[in-house]
Image: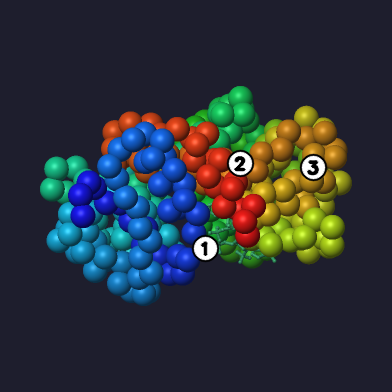
């Protein structure tokens, strides 16, 4: 092939929006880059890095189940990736492979795009899995002064709260006094707005209030029942596509050295979601 190649490794990868988003940005920038998705079996993430070296692949996106293995296999880690022991991006520094975790910075960038500055803010994060951990780490780095973690499994919340000195485990009523509330659980994924039940809601909407920033990291559907309820209360709602787009934009910055057009990336992702 001519040009340069970037790739996604994960399993499964067939429903990933990453190829659509990255290709749209490459096309808009007029660069000769291609992007492909490889389904790589669990435990073979380090082998995929070997392939990257042999084939001269210029950049890698990494998704589950390889984020931890790749963090162990690269030559160096950026600070967020080191703290999280998780890599979603591999890029080259000379002949060395560098691992980054751009999810958290992508989350902060998606809020900045909406005019929201997290510095000095009180934030409740619902969830304690990979997405929540990235968000908590990034909120700490960006200067949030009060980060409350709520999660179904308390032990996971306790572990996630160790990622930022401003973070602690809270109780549901903490939601009401937060400036920003984030759903970082799977709750609401695939939910049907018309037939939604309380099982589709990340927290009781009665805890939310007008003027709050309410963010749902779930992006399928784009408008979750929880986000719709927050909207109806007069909250400033932010959907999960912003984080997805901005973490991908930060990947391309590391690979190509220029910031891609995030509006083009979002339009491509919305079109792909509308087809599902
Ligand atoms: P994960 O590591 O599997 O974590 C899942 C989290 O959701 C855990 O905290 C889990 O609680 C909680 N959870 C799952 N089912 C639940 C239920 N029925 N009731 C209450 N809590 C429940 O997954 P992840 O990678 O963090 O992803 C979480 C969500 O974020 C997914 O919807 C994913 O699509 C989304 N996401 C979005 C972006 C983006 O760019 N917008 C990026 C990454 C992920 P326990 O600890 O109790 O199991």
Please rate how many residues cluster around mark 3, counting C-alpha atoms within 10 Å: few if below 14, some from 14 to 19, many from 20: many
- Viewer-nearest of discs 2 and 1: 1
Residue 197: in sight, yes or no? yes
Q: Earlier in the sequence, mark 1 or mark 3?
A: 1
Figure check: 99 above or below 119: below
Label 1 sits on residue: 15
Asked whether 42 or 166 is in front, the reply is 42
| Residue at position x 14%, y 43% in the image | 94
Task: Please report whichever mark, 2 or 1, sits nearer to the chain's N-terminal start.
Answer: 1
Q: Secondary structure at mark 3?
A: helix
- Between 139 and 50, the one nearer to me in the picture: 50
- Measured Cα–Cα span from mark 3 to mark 2: 20 Å
Query: Could you say where residue 237 lies in the image, as x and y percent from the top left?
Result: 71, 38
Give the x, y percent position of residue 190: 69, 62
Task: Give the CA distance from mark 2 to mark 1.
Answer: 32 Å
- Residue at the spot x=30%, y=72% of the render? 44
Decide: marks 1, 3 in contact (CB < 8 A)?
A: no
Q: In the image, is residue 164 above or below residue 16?
A: above
User: Residue 30, position in %: x, y?
Assistant: 34, 35
Identify the element where label 2 is drawn. Answer: strand
Residue 269 tag number:
none
Graded by Cα atoms within 10 Å as few (under 14), some (14 to 19) or many (20 or more), the crowding at tag 1 reads few
Image disc number at residue 147 = 2
Q: Nearer the viewer, residue 41 or 73?
A: 41
Q: Ligand 1 quadrant?
A: bottom right
Q: Which label sits on residue 230?
A: 3
At horizontal 15% and vertical 61% (from top left) the residue drawn is 54
The percent coordinates of residue 96 (x first, y second) are 16, 49
């Amino acid at each position: 092939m001519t040009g340069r190649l970037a790739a996604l490794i994960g399993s499964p990868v067939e429903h990933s929006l990453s190829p659509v988003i990255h290709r749209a940005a490459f096309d808009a920038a007029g660069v000769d880059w291609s992007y492909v998705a490889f389904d790589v079996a669990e435990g073979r993430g380090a082998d995929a890095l070997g392939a990257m070296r042999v084939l001269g692949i210029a950049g890698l996106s990494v998704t589950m189940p390889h984020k931890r293995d790749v963090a162990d296999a690269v030559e160096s880690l950026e600070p967020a990736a080191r703290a999280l022991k998780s890599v979603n991006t591999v890029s080259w520094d000379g002949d060395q492979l560098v691992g980054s975790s751009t999810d958290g910075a992508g989350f902060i960038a998606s809020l900045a795009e909406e005019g929201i500055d997290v510095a000095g803010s009180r934030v409740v994060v619902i969830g304690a899995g990979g997405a929540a951990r990235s968000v908590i780490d990034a909120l700490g780095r960006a200067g949030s002064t009060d980060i409350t973690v709520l999660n179904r499994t308390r032990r996971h919340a306790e572990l996630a709260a160790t990622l930022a000195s401003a973070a602690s485990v809270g109780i549901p009523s903490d939601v009401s006094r937060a400036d920003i509330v984030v759903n970082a659980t799977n709750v609401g994924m695939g939910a049907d707005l018309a037939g939604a039940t309380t099982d589709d809601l990340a927290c009781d909407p009665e805890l939310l209030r007008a003027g709050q920033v309410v963010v749902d990291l779930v992006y399928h559907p784009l408008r979750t029942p929880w986000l719709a309820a927050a909207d109806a209360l007069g909250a400033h709602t932010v959907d999960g596509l912003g984080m997805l787009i901005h973490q991908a934009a930060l990947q391309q910055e590391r690979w190509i050295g220029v910031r891609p057009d995030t509006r083009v990336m979002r339009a491509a992702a919305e079109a792909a979601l509308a087809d599902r």
